Amino acid sequence: MHLIWLRTDLRLHDNTALTAASQRGPVAAVYLITPQQWLAHDDAPCKVDFWLRNLHALEQALADVNIPLLIRHADTWDQAPGVLRQLCRELKVESVHVNEEYGIHESRRDRAVAQALEADGVTFHSYLDQLFFQPGSVLTKSGTYFQVFSQFRKVCYTRLHSALPRLVESPKAQARLDLQSDAIPTTVKGFAPPSETLRALWPAGENEARRRLDAFADEQISYYKDERDFPAKPGTSQLSAYLAAGVVSPRQCLHAALQSNQGEFESGDIGTITWINELLWREFYKHILVGYPRVSRHRAFRPETEAVAWRDAPKDLAAWQQARTGLPIIDAAMRQLLETGWMHNRLRMVVAMFLTKNLLIDWREGERFFMRHLVDGDLAANNGGWQWSSSTGTDSAPYFRIFSPLSQSEKFDSEGLFIKHWLPELAALNKKEVHNPEAAGGLFGVADYPRAIVDLKKSRERALAAFRSLPSRQEMADHE
């Protein structure tokens, strides 16, 4: 008997570890419910619910090829070695197969499990699956991990041209085992189920992920570069939650994109090229997790920015969290997050810059809040995005580049359609007033919409002063 331990790879098709395990002989699958670990990692209730619903869908798909899905409980990952060791003894398992995950805690967990199993003579096999390239295999000429995306992308393109990652064949039906699948819980203690409205936005299962991918590649990808920045338009793929949970693989995404562009990466359809770049950004941030482990430890990628004098401003932080800042584009974006578990990518940058620059509040507060609410929450991408916006990260915006929420709003939601959808209390304002109702005198007659909590010009100057006073990276190195 062989075992696949499922984590963020909740799919039957193009699943490297699952196929490898099934080729060795009879296989069963196991998934660990780890509530305290999820809480420690700030996983959102809507994300945990999405995982559980996808497990239900996967259980059906696995049943079609006679692979039982077992559920085990381990409150934290520290308990995983003992729980899996016990299961392997019960089932007389010869080998355990996993798809690699990245981050300090994930690597430590897998090493501990491998050690415990090997003490019992059970072999542990891990596979590259959620990335195109093994971390450590895309390096600078001096042998270090890239810190600048454009340079990383260039090497990736060269590698993809010479060897495109192939899709893995699906496991074939095996003889029925004398082993029943376990019931999958519909809820987990500590994670309140989300609203049915939110659930309906994110249907579970590979069929839905594939439907979204095919529809995007067929109908939308060509317009992606032109429309992805406009939050009122359906310009993005809406696949991030499925990628984060592994319901669809990056290889499937890449192949679908290339198919729509005659196999080209760098020429042809500009929308397709732009979207493939986004897949590579996702790859880049996971390589950063491995190459620079401090970002897994809530540390700034740029050590000199640890000295930023962030404000302790609980009222301002709460106003941002509750969509009560008095700046419509910020509040509309935050309401979208709170109600749907997702936020448009352009707006993720806008609200992150507002929190870290205009309010001068520590990026870690924003990173944590996002993780606690995002259905697509992913440590590497979320941390990378927050550190980029706050000018503490790799390849980050220079500190003096501070998005103005007003100009972003006027540029990317010129008619105010997105704002009015999420802030219906502003629906009566015209398209000029809606971006800054206070300045336009439009707040009169608008019930219960707050005044702006901050002066954008003064707060921008405050942020510039805070960053200008930092020691340089060279000074930090000399001091060490």
Image (cartoon, rainbow, N blue to C red):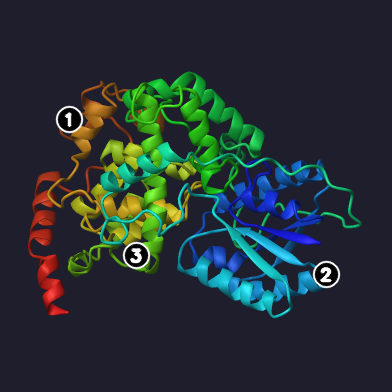
User: Looking at the rendering, which quadrant does residue 413 occupy?
Assistant: top left
Q: Residues within 10 Å of mark 1 (few under 14, many from 20)?
A: few
Residue at (32%, 37%) from the top-left corner? Answer: 346
148, above or below 205, in the image: below
Q: Is residue 37 above or below residue 454?
A: below
Q: Secondary structure at mark 2?
A: loop
Quadrant assignment, res 69: bottom right
**Residue on which disc 2 sits:** 92
The x and y percentages for residue 155 are 33, 45
**N-terminal of the two: label 2 or label 1?**
2
Element type where label 3 sits in the image: loop
Quick check: 209 left or right of 286? right
Report the side of 289 relative to 59 (left or right): left
Amino acid bearing label 3: Tyr
Which callout, 3 or 1, points at the residue further toward the start of the chain?
3
Residue 29, given in percent of the width and then of the height, sits at 74, 56
Q: CA distance from mark 2 to mark 3?
A: 39 Å
| Residue designated by label 1 | 441
Query: On residue 292, which mark appears?
Result: 3
